[in-house]
Amino acid sequence: MSKIVVGVDLGGTNIAGVLIDEKGELKGSKVWPTEAEYGPEHILRRIIELIRTLLEENGFTLNQLQGVGVGVPGLVNTREGRSIISHNLPGWKDIAVAQKIHEEINAPVFIENDVRMAAWGEKLLGAGQDKEDIVCLTLGTGIGSGIFIQGKMFKGRKESAGEIGHMTVEKDGLRCNCGNYGCLELYASGRGIARRAKEALANHTSSLILKLVNGDINQITAATVCTAAKQGDELALKVIKETALYLGIGLANVANLLNPQRIILGGGVMQAGELLLEPTREVVYSRALPLNREVEIVPAKLGEWAGAIGGAMLAKMQFIEGRSSLEWVW
Ligand SMILES: [Zn+2]
């Protein structure tokens, strides 16, 4: 009877799950809506139901399940298996996620912040394999990161390290939700890109961006800007190039601070691909110290599955191989 593990990635819109066997082979995957509007109890039931469905549909039983890793957005206390708060999930505050899931499935469960879980996915099965010093950034609605130093994830005293999105890149910049001014997230996140495109459009009426949203400026997202840029729209290209400048300044700081081998960029903003990556590399190579310029800057490989894969692969290491990497498990 083969042993299996499950990884789950909880998001504001979707819950994704993967099933991986003892050889590390993917045996099933599933994604369904979070239905976050129905509250925390409902979300927890959805996660448990997703785990059960994944097993059933792929011909496995609960007895074969060796463990589950769950990526949760927002602040988490991994030692207590508790989610402290997530602003993307209404009413989601101080939830004993690991314990509640464990009680229903009777297998060990651990949780981690979703961005860090995605970083684990990239490290173990994606763009960071065989590298020890890595920084994985997720450029989504906000900007988060997972940092590996000598193969180990660095989280800081209170699990608050890696907040690259709140690094100051503009001294007199806009005020951020965090209270600081000019945070990287305000300029290079999906939301930041959309906002800057709207601002740029105030003096421009001929951009393809406007056509793509039928003139409704409120519909503009980072994806709209990426689509327009790929078709050569001048204003969109300018916005992407400026994004690369902010991102490059942030990454040059990261390179100077940590001297990583590789920086991996994922998240929705990476739809822009090389259009964003190439100018970002140029900024890093022109601003970081010579030895720190050697850092490779590459796109993530696992896309939106990174978090679920990270959870499953960590569970496999911990519960099947007995390679202890986790501090606390329920
Ligand atoms: Zn901030």
Image (cartoon, rainbow, N blue to C red):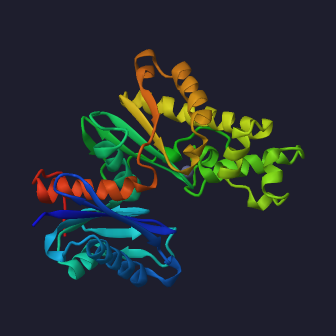
Q: Residue furthest top?
A: 290
Q: Is residue 127 left or right of residue 234?
A: left
Q: Position of residue 134 (x, y in %)?
A: 35, 36
Which quarter of the rendered picture does the C terminus lie within?
A: bottom left
Q: How many marks?
A: 0
User: In this rendering, is residue 70 above or below 191?
Assistant: below
Residue 74 seen in the figure: yes
When asked about the image quadrant of residue 270, the answer is top right
Q: Position of residue 137 (x, y in %)?
A: 45, 44
Quadrant the N terminus occupies: bottom left
Q: Say whether residue 52 is left or right of residue 277.
A: left
**83 vs 209, nearest the viewer:** 209
Q: Is residue 98 left or right of residue 142?
A: left
Q: Residue at x 22, y 78 (%)?
A: 105
Residue name at image x 31 percent, y 40 percent: 148
**What residue is rendered at 26% in x and 72% in y?**
55
Q: Quadrant location of residue 149?
A: top left
Residue 261: x %, y % from top left: 35, 28
Q: Is residue 174 visible?
A: no
**Whole-percent x, y for residue 11 in the image:** 46, 65
Please name the residue shown 86% across and 48% down the image.
202
Q: Nearer the viewer, residue 3 or 282?
A: 3
